[in-house]
Amino acid sequence: MSTNGHSTPLPMTKKDFSSDQETRWCPGCGDYAILATVQSLMPELGVPPERTVFISGIGCAGRFVYYMDTYGMHGIHGRAPALATGLAVSRPELSVWVVTGDGDSLSIGGNHLIHALRRNVPLKILLFNNQIYGLTKGQYSPTSEQGKVTKSTPFGSQDHPFNPLALALGAEATFVARAVDTDRGHVADVLRAAAEHKGAAFVEIYQNCNVFNDGAFDALRDKEPRKRNMIMLEAGKPIRFGEENERGVVQRSDGSLELVDVADVGEDALVIHDPEHRDPSLAFALAHLAERPTGPTPVGVFRSVSRPVYAEGLHEELEEARSNVGDEELTELLTGGDAWTVPAAGA
């Protein structure tokens, strides 16, 4: 934290969270906008850099930790949630953030991601989704559309893609949201809500890779199509969108959602967005409203519910065990009759 030389805390600024490292993403990469938003938001959250940790895996997003003047770890492929879980459990006073990409977290790291969400570990997980492997020069990723033509799939990929939000909701994540890299104000709003959430917060950020997958999110990033396609979710309000707010979302009898003209169905027929509803069915349906971000697509907070936080319960359990049996029991266990010694080579 900044001081005035007399140990008096000064208001923190973006500079307090910005390292002196040269940013080395491709010119025009969406990561720049996300980084600037996060650095600007951090002072507002009131947690000093020395109590903030960013942890990443492998990929372009992995470089994020170098540019934050906080503590940080650049882990191996897909393991950032596992590293972050250990830290958050052992040091609950820290604010722990995970920065990952669609390849890092949904391929080799998929198992670690879903269990961090299932356990409700107090982590803020930012998934930069550019629907491509950018660092390794453009192979299709777990979120690339079926039929994606890349260097590794010259005739089109055969894989059905992951829906990251549906995956997170299926893992019973308590906070699930989506934002678009260039909409810095909305990204900040979503991350602020994620920071205030007690437990695991999962935020998918559509991030343009202008070298290997340029234009994947133009329907939501460019000014004119954005007016038609951005469905901004607002708690307690009917889900409406369109240039004149003339379109809306209704729910069919089978639970699925449908895009309609409000004039045809009336305001009262529209779905009222309720991210705090315990049943994740509506959030799941919203996650599937647009299988690809090429048309009307919801953004915002899909789900935000409370559930016991993993680390809190664990610490209570450890304290109870310690008070009941004492530390001597652990020493006896480690040195008792069921332990064995591996002799040194040649002994």
Image: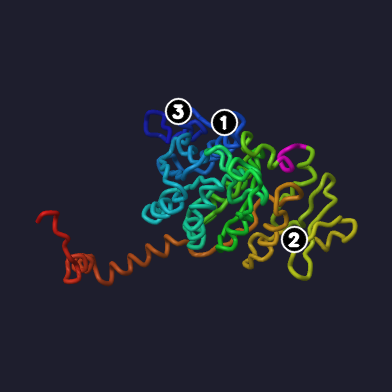
Q: Report which quarter residue 331 is drawn in.
A: bottom left
Q: Earlier in the sequence, mark 2 or mark 1?
A: 1
Secondary element at tag 3: loop
Residue 133 falls inside the magenta stretch = no
Residue 131: x and y, percent?
Answer: 62, 45
Give the quarter of the figure containing the C terminus: bottom left
The disc at residue 272 is 2
Q: In this rendering, is residue 277 above or below 49?
A: below
Q: Amino acid at mark 2?
A: Ile
Residue visible at 62% across and 67% down in the picture: 278
| Res 199 visible | no
Q: Which residue is mark 1?
A: 26
Is residue 334 visible in the rendered image? The answer is yes
Magenta stretch, residue numbers: 218-223
Q: Which mark is residue 20?
A: 3
Report the residue at 74% width, 47% height from top. 294
Most foreground residue, 241 or 26: 26
Looking at the image, do the residues carrying marks 2 and 3 touch, with CB atoms under 8 Å apart? no
Residue 59, given in percent of the width and then of the height, sits at 50, 41
Pointers 2 and 1 in contact (C-beta within 8 Å):
no
- Pick whichever of labels 2 and 3 is earlier in the sequence: 3
Q: Secondary structure at mark 2?
A: loop
Q: Residues within 10 Å of mark 1 (few under 14, many from 20)?
A: some
128 w.r.t. 278: above or below:
above
Q: Which numbered marker is on residue 144?
A: none
Q: Are marks 1 and 3 in contact (CB under 8 Å)?
A: no
